[in-house]
Image: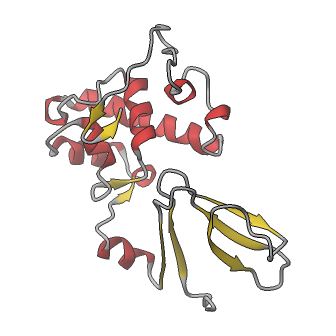
């Protein structure tokens, strides 16, 4: 299948997906689920998904795709006022509200934990019990944590040591108090 210049490749990586480029087309990387051969290049692009939790689509209109799939605006393209107003209307836990992709996209399970950790907010706290000031702090922590993740290429080994993400292994120690990190299920997700 040939992708036209007007087409957009939509990749949702799930928890373990990534993209890599390679030259030996007869020997794709392990766990490749899609190979894209690039015109005028010896390289191919592979979508790698060890756990196969992601999604691959093709669309002619990114805006229509987001609307058709009930995907909210990119949280990094949202301003503080809209974030606070939108979350202020939600019910349930703050962790679930952050991960609800129909409201805002771009915050998954691990980063919701990181954002809440940086703010000192329990993931089970009811979002409708948070005042606008706390939601503003959450917005700032979210922007900071996601920027750090982007700068680190989402590689936990390159994240700052004061981040929870670098200590999530079994028997990990809290970077703030050095106590043992406990995992719990909140809204069906490890937290």
Q: Position of residue 170 (x, y in %)?
A: 50, 24
**Residue 167 picture quarter:** top right
Which residue lies at the image location 43% right of the left edge and 18% below the top edge?
A: 181
Pick the quarter of the image with the C terminus.
Answer: top left
Look at 79% across and 70% down and name the residue there. 27
At a point 50% along the width and 18% down the height, the residue shown is 171
Query: For this rendering, which residue is in front, 78 or 182?
Result: 182
Left or right, 2 with reference to 188: right
Quadrant of res 74: bottom left
Q: How many marks?
A: 0
Location of residue 122 with respect to 108 vertically, above or below: above
Give the quadrant of the N terminus. Answer: bottom right
Which scheme is used to colour this image of the protein? secondary structure
Position of 184 with respect to 6 (left or right) is left
- State the image coordinates of residue 174 (x, y, percent, origin top left): 48, 15
Residue ID at (76%, 74%): 44
* Vertical position of residue 191 compared to residue 4: above or below: above
Q: In the image, residue 142 lies at what x, y percent?
A: 43, 37
Q: Position of residue 123 (x, y in %)?
A: 29, 30
60 horizontally vs 2: left or right: left
Q: Nearer the viewer, residue 188 or 121?
A: 188
Vertical position of residue 63 compared to residue 89: above or below: below
Q: Quick check: 63 above or below 92?
A: below
Task: Name the residue nearer the viewer: 112 or 171.
Answer: 171
């Amino acid at each position: 299948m040939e992708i036209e210049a007007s087409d957009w490749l939509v990749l949702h990586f799930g928890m373990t997906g990534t993209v890599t480029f390679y030259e030996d087309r007869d020997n794709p990387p392990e766990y490749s689920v899609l190979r894209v051969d690039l015109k005028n290049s010896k390289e191919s692009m592979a979508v790698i998904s060890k756990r196969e939790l992601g999604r691959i689509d093709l669309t002619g209109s990114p805006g229509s795709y987001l609307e058709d799939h009930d995907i909210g605006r990119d949280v990094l393209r949202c301003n503080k006022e809209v974030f606070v107003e939108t979350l202020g209307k939600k019910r349930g836990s703050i962790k679930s509200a952050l991960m609800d992709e129909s409201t805002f996209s771009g915050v998954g399970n691990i980063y919701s934990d990181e954002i809440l950790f940086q703010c000192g907010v329990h993931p089970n706290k009811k979002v409708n019990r948070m005042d606008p000031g706390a939601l503003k702090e959450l917005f700032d922590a979210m922007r900071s944590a996601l920027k750090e993740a982007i700068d680190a290429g989402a590689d936990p080994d390159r994240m700052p040591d004061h981040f929870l993400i670098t200590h999530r292994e079994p028997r990990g120690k809290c970077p703030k108090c050095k106590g043992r990190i406990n995992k719990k299920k909140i809204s069906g997700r490890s937290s």
